[in-house]
Image (spheres, rainbow, N blue to C red):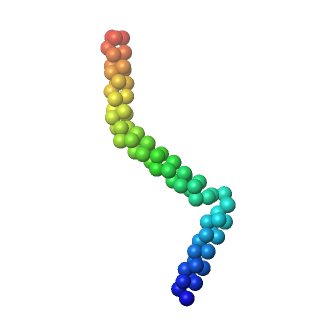
Amino acid sequence: MSKNKNNCNEGLVQRFVEDERGEFGIKQIAATVAVIVVIGFVVTAISGNMGTWVEEIWDQFMELIGSNISSNT
């Protein structure tokens, strides 16, 4: 009886996989997940350096303002 049940379950799974013709297939879902992971890595890398970038830009901006003020007086 359990052998019959396993064959039935295998048939259901096989029909489900074969019938996967909708808008999203297994490969498309896997590719989407991969793209999301890559975007996550990029965002993490950028946000980790964001504080130093903002600090460097702010310092340069303040130096530019300071040099313009001191050269005009």
User: Horizontal and vertical percent for residue 72?
Assistant: 36, 11
Q: Residue 26 or 64: which is nearer the viewer? A: 26
Quadrant the N terminus occupies: bottom right
Horizontally, is 12 left or right of 70 in the view?
right
Residue drawn at the location 55% of the way across and 80% of the way down:
6
Q: Residue 30 or 68: which is nearer the viewer? A: 30
Residue drawn at the location 67% of the way across and 60% of the way down:
22
Compared to 15, does 41 lie above or below?
A: above
Horizontally, is 72 left or right of 2 in the view?
left
Horizontally, is 49 left or right of 13 in the view?
left
Task: Report the residue that reaches farthest toward the bottom.
Answer: 1
Compared to 48, does 16 lie above or below?
A: below
Q: Residue 10 or 32: which is nearer the viewer? A: 10
User: Horizontal and vertical percent for residue 15?
Assistant: 64, 70
The image quadrant that residue 41 belongs to is: top left
The image quadrant that residue 63 belongs to is: top left
